[in-house]
């Protein structure tokens, strides 16, 4: 229309395709990086061991890490809001203990499993209320949740409780064969469903978009009239519920509940989420990325197993990877801040 | 057109607006009105009640007395969002959008179109955003992430969001403070388009030029009271300033000149070929004892970069700096400080003052840091020192224990100056020391800078406002695209001739 207008639009029209791609999908770059690392590990292991990647192995990675996958999905919500949830490992352990004890008293699993989920949700709600309404740092609030859940686990029993309930054991024991060694267990299906639901919630609902908005700038989100308080609360509830579900899955996986289960699992979860490209400062990341992060974690464990060296190397490798990713994230953030 | 407006019913009518903060009355029985299809400016010094009135209008603050009518009906908003739904949208000075989300989401967030199952319909969301942008004549990719765009584009997106609902009143709070000339022109084009659509626009700005260019009507506030409402065409600038300040205009108009340095006074700091890329290349600067060197340049010409390079904040990629004839490496601000070179950042809130700390603590902070933790300044001495600076710089209120954040912008700037001066520097680099402070305080700071130079300090004075660069500077360095293209005496220059020099390279084709 006028000549002044072209100053801006003319410049923007000249934007080249690669620029346009970056402008649209910059936040996917860390996820691609995680996929790259996963592929590099698989290729490397394949070359080194000769016969490494088999359908059996891939299937077992999903089986062995389905509880972690579920925890990572919940954690992604919380980290996206700019928070952190340290309670998930303890909540998983406690709900497992509670469930196992209820089952031993003869309650049917159709009652026990939902109770475990509800308990997880309730603890998540408590952490969320502390964070939102009492303005407690998420680190401290969820630390309190962790100690509470850990303690309650010991109150239930100091010893391992064996689970004999058929439906629960079925979740783990059933191997749905898909030919040539591929198989999947109901626990794996549940974990993948959680990923699907989590990704859908984040990408296609107002709740999900508000999670990103809160992580981007809480003050702005509030001024835009978004339900910030409800969203933050819900994020912790989602994480708690996932921890409860992970309790069910982990109990099925080990066939027993033990009060010392899941110590440090919250940290593995956070590591997987961060490796999967979610920014610890919030506002950027994807559930799919967290899934890749969990697979990277599982792959490292498997390779260390193949190498036959001590499992402590898993932690060391994860630590190194985590460091790498956090540094790379800082560089990305610093670069985009400088551009402005 | 104006005469018909007088007959029409105002779209917004505020009567007897009163807001009290504990014992202070921030707004005292103010009447205010806006008509559809006009651009209205709210003028006043800091503390006059402008922001309080805006907050009351947009639901961020409740009125203690009085009422707001929108289209004749009394309205009460609990939150800014309520006001937004009722048709009063605000775009704040700091862009309150989400840089991590796409342009489309920033426009549609909270009311994204949804399909039958209740999932967000992304194609429809992008269409909605595209339409809102197109209505303003903007072509911005709705799927791109907001943070990848320059601030000016983000500001325009904020406006697109504000008007994409059925907007009746659009409040723009200092929308141009971070835009350059072309971007302001673009913003004004958008404002005119909205005005033609019948939107009432409240335009708040410290830049008088812009107010006179775009506004139809001006309401002046002073000390929380209404001074009057005027048509822009009927109010002379000098009268406007007088009404804002409540002081005689003659005192302001009188141009106070500062003593030019003696010819034999020595060069304190001399920079040759200073380069920090991107931003500043091959810059030569000489600072003479007791002079103010003004720095003039467009946004992005490297003003701040030059300041940072001269004061050790950014490391030089090439070039040398001599202080008193001796070559020195300013490897850090601390090192520069020990050589008597200090820097006052343009972002006084984020890079200068600590809002929660008191005036006393803010003033003595750097001095204590310079001495080191082990050699603590006795608190009686601290108070004495701070009090003397508060008095010398006329910091108001003269209360040492008041948190700095509660002071007005001008007084905050003085506290920052006091902190730097307490270090007894030889060279002081001031980057936009008067940005965002009111006219009266601006003049005070300018005079203060002149006095400092008279006392033998070398001052570098950087400002986007050419007028004050001319007023304060003995000489003016012209910056273009990161190069010091010329250093000229300010004597005999006018704002227009300086503007021509500053804009030369870009104006060549025009």
Image (cartoon, coloured by chain):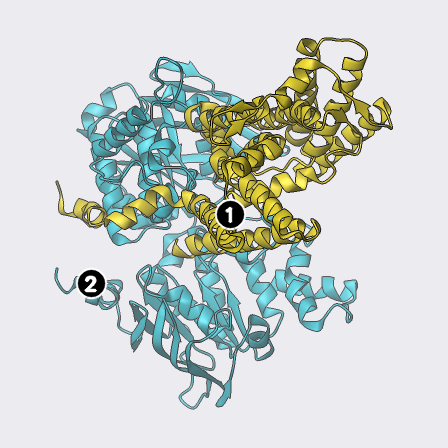
Chain colours: A yellow, B cyan
C-alpha span from label 2 to label 1 = 65 Å
Could you say which is closer to the camera, residue B137 or residue B112?
Answer: B112
Q: Is residue B192 left or right of residue B58?
A: left
Q: Residues within 10 Å of mark 2 (few under 14, many from 20)?
A: few
User: Which residue is the site of mark 1?
Assistant: A51
Q: Considering the numbered disc 1 on the image, is that residue within a helix, a strand or a loop? A: loop
* x then y, percent, for residue A294: 56, 39
- The chain that hosts pointer 2 is B
Residue A247 in view of the camera:
yes
Quick check: do tags 2 and 1 share a chain?
no
Residue A335 versus residue A132 in the image, above or below: below
Q: Position of residue B346 (x, y in %)?
A: 46, 59
Residue B473 in which image quadrant? bottom left
| Residue depicted at 44% across the width and 57% down the height | B434
Number of disc labels? 2
Q: Which labelled disc corresponds to residue B54? A: none
**Whether residue A117 can be seen here:** no
Q: Position of residue A100 (x, y in %)?
A: 77, 19
Residue B146: x %, y % from top left: 37, 41
Front residue (pair A121, B253): A121
The residue labelled by disc 2 is B506
């Amino acid at each position: 229309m006028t000549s002044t207008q072209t100053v801006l639009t003319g410049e923007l029209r000249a934007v080249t395709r690669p620029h346009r791609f970056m402008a649209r999908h910059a936040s996917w770059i860390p996820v691609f990086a995680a996929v790259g690392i996963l592929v590099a590990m698989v290729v490397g292991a394949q070359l080194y061991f000769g016969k490494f990647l088999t359908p059996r192995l891939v299937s077992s990675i999903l089986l062995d890490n389905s509880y972690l996958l579920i925890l990572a999905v919940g954690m992604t919500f919380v980290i996206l809001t700019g928070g952190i949830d340290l309670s998930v490992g303890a909540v998983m352990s406690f709900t497992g203990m509670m469930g196992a004890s209820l089952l031993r008293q003869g309650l049917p699993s159709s009652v026990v499993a939902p109770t475990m989920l509800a308990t997880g949700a309730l603890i998540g709600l408590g952490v969320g209320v502390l964070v939102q309404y009492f303005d407690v740092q998420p680190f401290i609030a969820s630390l309190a949740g962790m100690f509470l859940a850990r303690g309650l686990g010991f109150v239930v029993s100091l010893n391992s409780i064996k689970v004999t309930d058929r439906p629960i054991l079925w979740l783990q024991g059933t191997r749905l064969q898909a030919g040539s060694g591929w198989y999947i267990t109901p626990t794996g299906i549940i974990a993948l469903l959680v990923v699907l639901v989590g990704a859908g919630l984040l990408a296609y609902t107002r709740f999900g978009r508000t999670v990103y908005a809160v992580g981007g700038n809480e003050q702005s989100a509030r001024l835009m009239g978004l339900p910030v308080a409800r969203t933050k609360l819900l994020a912790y509830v989602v994480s708690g519920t996932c921890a409860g579900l992970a309790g069910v899955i982990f109990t099925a996986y080990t066939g027993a509940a033990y009060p010392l289960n899941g110590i440090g699992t919250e940290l593995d979860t956070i590591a997987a989420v961060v490796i999967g490209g979610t920014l610890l400062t919030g506002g950027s990341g994807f559930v799919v990325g967290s899934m890749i992060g969990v697979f990277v974690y599982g792959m490292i464990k498997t390779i260390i197993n193949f190498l036959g060296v001590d499992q402590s190397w898993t932690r060391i490798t994860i630590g190194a990877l985590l460091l790498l990713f956090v540094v790379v994230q800082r560089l990305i953030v610093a670069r985009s801040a400088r551009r402005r | 057109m104006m005469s018909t407006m007088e007959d029409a019913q105002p779209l917004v009518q505020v009567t007897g607006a009163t807001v009290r903060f504990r014992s202070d009355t921030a707004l005292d029985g103010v009447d205010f009105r806006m008509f559809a299809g006009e651009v209205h400016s709210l003028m006043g010094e800091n503390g006059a009640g402008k922001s309080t009135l805006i907050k009351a209008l947009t639901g961020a603050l409740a009125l203690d007395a009085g009422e707001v009518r929108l289209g004749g009906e009394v309205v009460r908003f609990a939150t800014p969002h309520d006001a937004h739904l009722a048709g009063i949208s605000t775009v704040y000075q700091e862009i309150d959008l989400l840089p991590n989300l796409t342009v489309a989401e920033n426009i549609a967030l909270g009311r994204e179109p949804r399909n039958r199952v209740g999932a967000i319909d992304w194609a429809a969301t992008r269409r909605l955003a595209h339409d809102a942008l197109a209505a303003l004549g903007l072509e911005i990719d709705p799927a791109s992430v907001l943070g990848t765009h320059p601030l000016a584009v983000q500001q325009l997106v904020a406006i697109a969001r504000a008007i994409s609902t059925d907007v009746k009143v659009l409040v723009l709070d200092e929308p141009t403070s971070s835009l350059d000339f072309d971007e302001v022109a673009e913003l004004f084009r958008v404002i005119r388009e909205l005005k033609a659509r019948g939107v009432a626009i409240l335009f708040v700005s410290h830049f008088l030029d812009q107010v006179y260019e775009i506004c139809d009507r001006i309401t002046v506030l002073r000390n929380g009271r209404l001074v009057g409402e005027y048509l822009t065409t009927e109010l002379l600038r000098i009268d406007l300033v007088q009404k804002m300040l409540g002081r005689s205009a003659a005192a302001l108009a009188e141009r106070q000149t500062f003593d030019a340095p003696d010819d034999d006074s020595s060069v304190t700091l001399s920079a040759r070929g200073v380069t920090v890329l991107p931003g500043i290349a091959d810059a030569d600067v000489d600072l003479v004892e007791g002079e103010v060197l003004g720095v003039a340049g467009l946004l992005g010409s490297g003003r701040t970069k030059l300041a940072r390079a001269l004061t050790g904040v950014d490391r030089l990629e090439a070039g040398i700096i001599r202080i008193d004839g001796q070559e020195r490496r300013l490897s850090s601000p601390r090192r520069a400080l020990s050589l008597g070179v200090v820097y006052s950042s343009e972002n006084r809130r984020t890079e200068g003052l600590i809002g929660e700390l008191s005036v006393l603590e803010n003033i003595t902070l750097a001095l204590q840091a310079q001495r080191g933790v082990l050699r603590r300044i006795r608190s009686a001495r601290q108070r004495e020192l701070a009090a003397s600076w508060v008095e010398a710089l006329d910091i108001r209120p003269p209360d040492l224990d008041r948190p700095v954040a509660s002071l007005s912008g001008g007084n905050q700037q003085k506290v920052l100056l006091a902190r730097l001066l307490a270090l007894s520097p030889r060279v002081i680099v001031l980057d936009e020391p008067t940005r965002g402070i009111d006219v009266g305080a601006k003049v005070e700071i300018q005079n203060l800078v002149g006095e400092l130079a008279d006392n033998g300090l070398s001052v570098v004075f950087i400002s986007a406002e050419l007028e004050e660069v001319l007023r304060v500077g003995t000489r003016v360095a012209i910056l273009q695209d990161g190069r010091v293209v010329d250093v000229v005496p300010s004597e005999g220059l006018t704002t227009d001739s300086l503007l021509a020099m500053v804009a030369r390279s870009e104006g060549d084709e025009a």
